Image (cartoon, rainbow, N blue to C red):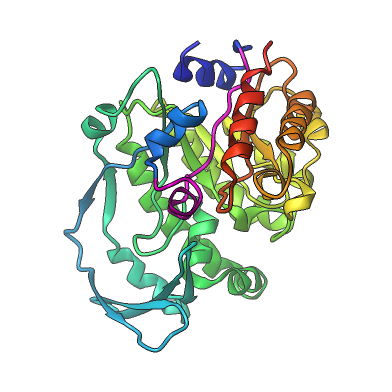
Amino acid sequence: MKTKERFNAVLKGEVPDRLPVVTHHLMPYSLQNYLGGISQKEFFKKFGIDEIAWVGYLKVDESKDWHVETEDIPDQKYKSTRYNIDTPKGRLTMVIQKNDYTQWVTEYPIKEDADIEKLDYFPRHYADVEKINAQNSEDVILRGTIPGFDIFGQPGCWQDAACLYGIENLIMKTYDDPQWVRELLERMMAYKLEYVESIKGAEYDIIELGGGDASSTVISPGILDEFVAPYDAKIIEAAHKNGQKIVYHTCGGMMPILENLLSMKPDALETFTPPEMGGDTDLAKAKKIIDGRACMIGGFDQGHYFTGCTPEETRAAVRRCFEAAGEGGGYVLSPSDHFFEAQEDLIMAFADEARKCTY
């Protein structure tokens, strides 16, 4: 089977020729510091991993009154940038810090309840279907994501809201003022649904939704059912109407909320992070609970088997994943989210052993 054919067979619940093996995002840090600065395409060719192309060509409607200026904040431990966002209803400010690994928010733009009204001026995003489809190939899995807040955001409605307000603040607000949280989430959902309407005809194989702030290591099943599922489920439904498949990304705990996640009817779930990496996944148990209702992607412990062990140990870890979740198809082997440190020989062992897992 070709890469795309293999991946889509698994998504449809069919049995492929062998276990599909992918990665999530490849991080520039790993490519530069551990793999000699090779490109992403060179990475997939070198290791024989099923290639994923993350494609997100956007058309942006900037007709609304939303003006952003940036300024560097000097004398910081990390590179720090303040974003000043002016709208007809006042200013929002946001601070992002970054290091060689990643970036994060240190000042959230929503500071007062009325600030959510300023989000009404946020520019809308639409898919550039022609450019997206130009990247399509039988040798590549074409993967996209539901756009988040421009400066720093993520796909899911709840996840995007957490990026704007802070997850601790957001959780407390569900108790103190649940109606305000719903109004914020409605705004998140509205601009994401506008994007979803534009992806009809895009030849994506899978599109990502969700985020780790909806995991069971962050929120309760009750919060998920009341403040996450009602909004993200509508996005999944709209995506399905436009011919797209959705993978729901939950880096963190998943086991107590698998049924809650399945209720949103995604086509696939990820990342199935093992306990040794801060998650809680028992792959074999998850496989039984899911019972073919969604494809499973992830489950591999890259923290312990991409560094500091022998190739034989890495191969054994791959086999354990396959034995736990591979039976009958419906499973794609992948590291549980990103990896930064990685030894070349261990990535090679990971990919080679996965290709030997045949049906």
Residue found at x 51% / y 25%: 48
Give the farthest residue toward the bottom: 75
Q: Position of residue 249 (x, y in %)?
A: 58, 44
Visible in this render: residue 290?
Answer: no
Q: In the image shown, does 223 or 179 lie closer to the viewer?
A: 223
Q: State the extent of the magenta-drawn residues as a range.
A: 18-37
Count the labels in the image.
0
Which residue reaches farthest left? 63
- Considering only vertical position in the picture, is 261 above or below 153? above
Name the image quarter holding residue 128: top left
Q: Residue at x 38, y 50 (%)?
A: 147
Relative horizontal placement of residue 80, taking residue 87 as reference (left or right): right
Q: Is residue 90 above or below residue 230?
A: below
Note whether 79 is above or below 239 in the view shown. below
Specify whether 242 is left or right of 124. right
Residue 3 appears in the figure: yes
- Using the rendered view, name the quadrant where residue 322 is placed: top right
* 1 lies above or below 353: above
- For the stretch drawn in magenta, what is the main secondary structure? loop
Question: Between 158 and 9, which is closer to the camera in this rendering?
Answer: 9
Q: Is 26 included in the stretch rendered in magenta?
A: yes
Which residue occupies 62% across, 15% down? 18
Where, by quadrant of the figure, is residue 238 drawn? top left
Task: Name the spot of residue 213 as percent of width and height, x first.
Answer: 61, 58
Residue 169 within the magenta-colored segment of the rendering:
no
Which residue is at the front of the view, 239 or 21? 21
Query: In the rendered view of the protein, which quadrant contains the C terminus?
Result: top right
Q: Is residue 130 left or right of residue 210?
A: left
Residue 45 image point, x, y percent = 43, 28
